[in-house]
Amino acid sequence: MKLQSMNCPNCNGQLKKEGENFICSSCGSAFAVDYDESDVAYKALQKQDEIMEKTKGFRIVFFAIVILTMLVMVFVFVKIFQSFQKNSDDMKKGFGNRQGIVTEKVSEDELSKDLILSDEEFLQNAEAAAVSLLKSEHKTVKYTDFMWEKNLMTPPEASLDAEPEMVGSYLMTSGLSNHYVMIYKLDFAFEYNSEKNIRTMYDCVILDNLKVSDDGKVQSDYQVRTERHTGADLTFMAYEDKDQLYREVVLGKPGYEVTQLT
């Protein structure tokens, strides 16, 4: 095998193979190498050329796949970002609208204290529904107290001693919903040592979805409900402290304007 110098004889620069010739990278001179086809170096160069030629198509496809994958990833990322941005904007708009609704006050010509107090039919129907619900929920209770537990005595049953008595009513208004809240005093009677004892408790009844009809009357579906929180006595399912009931049930809802009716 005969090897020729791989440096340029003119400037001693590095030679670079281009086709069958070698080109000086410094001065640009072209040279031919006197290879014997049986030389190992020649065969290696030929093999390298063949490999490069065979893999040319594969390399083009590979780079095309890489570029296409990157484009798809960029497209997906942009779509996800746009979707997230849209959802975020929708949530902001929805929250803003909800805040606007909750804090909106009912106008004077709609639900008002005077309108409710002047609508006798509504007041009678509301009270009848409230009393019926309270009687149903407070039929009898086992009045457990330390004096019976200490003496291992069977606790007596306490029951309503009189009709529930309304001691306050309130209008809760907002653009989202309107409620009529009635607070009742409940007297529970039980016997101890052959004597009648009275335990006074308080409960509330709520009418939802109040609105004004076309003829200026107060409307409701009269689907009454009770609402109790942490201050409620679990034995009587009512409050011993009326003020606490008022704070939890009536004042415990932010965004409502509260008007005392009675």
Image (cartoon, rainbow, N blue to C red):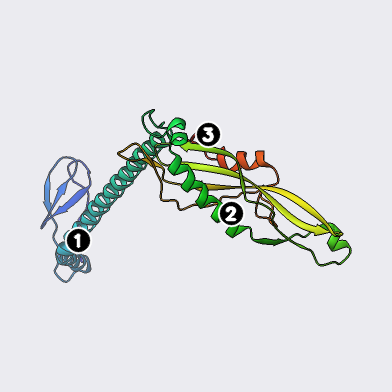
For residue 37, above or below residue 11 = below
- Pointer 1 or 2: first along the chain: 1
| Rendering coords of residue 53 (x, y %) | 14, 64
| Rendering coords of residue 181 (x, y %) | 53, 42
In this view, the residue in front, 166 or 60, is 166
- Pointer 2 or 3: first along the chain: 2
Helix, strand, or loop for circle 2?
Answer: helix
In this view, the residue in front, 116 or 245, is 116
Residue for badge 1: 59
| Label at residue 261 | 3
Residue for badge 2: 134
Q: CA distance from mark 2 to mark 3?
A: 20 Å
- Pointer 1 or 3: first along the chain: 1
Left-right relation of 28 to 128: left
| Rendering coords of residue 190 (x, y %) | 76, 58
| Rendering coords of residue 72 (x, y %) | 23, 54
At label 2, counting other C-alpha atoms closer than 10 Å, the crowd grade (few under 14, some 14-19, many 20 or more) is: many
Q: Residue furthest bottom?
A: 38
Q: In this rendering, which labeled residue sits more in front, label 1 or label 2?
A: 2
Helix, strand, or loop for circle 1?
Answer: helix
Helix, strand, or loop for circle 3?
Answer: loop
Tag 3: amino acid: Leu
The image quadrant that residue 182 belongs to is top right
| Label at residue 219 | none
Left-right relation of 88 to 45: right
Tag 2: amino acid: Leu
Q: Residue furthest right?
A: 151
Q: What residue is drawn where x is 64% and y is 61%?
A: 139
Left-right relation of 256 to 233: left
